[in-house]
Image (spheres, rainbow, N blue to C red):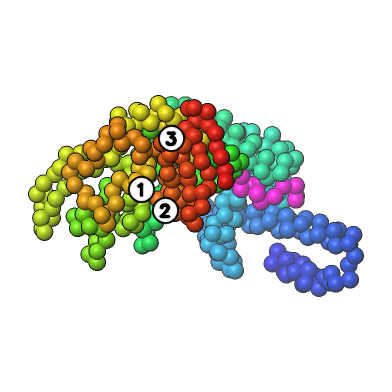
Amino acid sequence: MSVATAINQLQSKVKACDVATLNADELAAATSAVRGLERSLHGLTLRIGQRADALAASGDGPAAAENFRRGGSVSDKRARSEAKRAKTAARMPGLGDALSNGETSDEHLDAVTAALRGLDESEKEAFAEEEDSLVSSAKRLPPEQFRKKVQRAAQRARKDTGEQNAEAQRRASSFSSWTDRDGMGHFRGTLDPERFAAFVGAIERHTASLANRSGEQVQKNPNLAAAALCDLVAGGNGRQGRTHVSLVVDEHTAAHGQHPGTVRETSNGTPVTHTAAGRLLCDAVLQRVVLDPQGVPLDVGRKHRTATDAQWTALKAIYRTCAMCDLSVDWCQAHHLDPWHPPPTGGWREGRGQRGGLTNLDNLVPVCSLDHHLLHEGGYTAKLRPDRTLEVFQPDGSLWKTLRPDRFGRSEGRV
Ligand SMILES: [Zn+2]
Ligand SMILES: [Zn+2]
């Protein structure tokens, strides 16, 4: 009897199976029998792939992947992965046999296939020397644990476990970013293990401190992690912690506020809302550039800060943390309680940021980026009493809480 005939007869028998009247024990027995049959079919598929590759080697037919595709009813991807399993089984026959005998699963074989991918020919040979121990582990361990064992074996087989590999990984690192039609920014990156660990570690630590800022539980919070990433990339620590964004505002908007032709966008052309512009200007380095109608710069003003270094030093003497939460002051931005730059009434003019200096400190509090958002975009407002007690009001105008600078013993009153 041909193999195809045998399988076809088996198929008819399988189709004729009636499970409608089975009890629980019989169902369990049937399931276990089905699993066994599945495994022996997978084993047969392996042997078919190996035979196809052997024929292909002597020019008598297509290789395994093409054979599986011709067999029909499978995706390209599945045909390729079946062919890869056949190759792995050819290299490590003991593993192929274990699968054919129903002692391991496809997933065990796939783990080995994946590990072999990163090795050169002589490393693959070194890896295959561990076959006996791998086969016995495959029979014993679930795929997840087996995968780890396989990865360790691949690591041992690799000739170069040191410098050269690390250097190649550094060179393979990359980062790219782009903006979609909605203006959302996206990025994709690949980092070598060492820098990746540092990168992820920094984000996790800062995410945890953001989560803790109001005594919240640390938990996986992708949105908070994004805030942490932005804090970190913006340069960290206090005075450097401010966002580096070039904001382009036309003169009329700067002087008189919104008008039909308002230009208020980042240097790459992404529009910025009125409130977001207010938050950015709250703690920023400003430089006025005047362009003629053709876009030629006529005048470039000097840079100045909306909160001076002296003011910031003074704030750090008063506050160890954000004025509204427990996050370290090193992660804070200066918030102007009386907006530094209200476009509808005030002009964005050279020198305006110099006004006040230290005498103006009663208008400044350090806030973390999350609380800064609350104050500008979230509709919350804050007022400073002469004794530096901060009153924070909810969007509906009701008093939310009062806070004292932590340096003098944080006392927080909730209303
Ligand atoms: Zn602000
Ligand atoms: Zn805060």
Kindly tell me whether residue 181 is visible in this rendering. yes
Determine whether label 2 and label 3 are within 8 Å by CB: no
Crowd rating for badge 3 (residues with CA inside 10 Å; few <14, some 14–19, many 20+)? some
Residue ID for mark 1 = 279
Q: Disc 1, ligand 1: is the CB inside 8 Å?
A: yes
- Toward the viewer: 337 or 36? 337
The nearer-to-camera label among 2 and 3 is 3
Circle 3 residue: 388
Q: Which badge, 2 or 1, comes first in the chain's sequence? A: 1
Residue type marked 2: Glu
Q: Is mark 2 within 8 Å of ligand 1?
A: no
Residue nearer the viewer, 129 or 374: 374
Q: CA distance from mark 3 to mark 1?
A: 22 Å
Q: Position of residue 37 (x, y in %)?
A: 76, 58
Q: Position of residue 156 (x, y in %)?
A: 57, 30
409 to 139, vertically: above or below: above
Q: Secondary structure at mark 2?
A: loop
Start-end of magenta stretch: 101-111
Q: Amino acid at mark 1?
A: Arg
Residue at (34, 35) in percent of width and height:
361
Which residue is identified by label 2? 377
Which structural element holds mark 1? helix
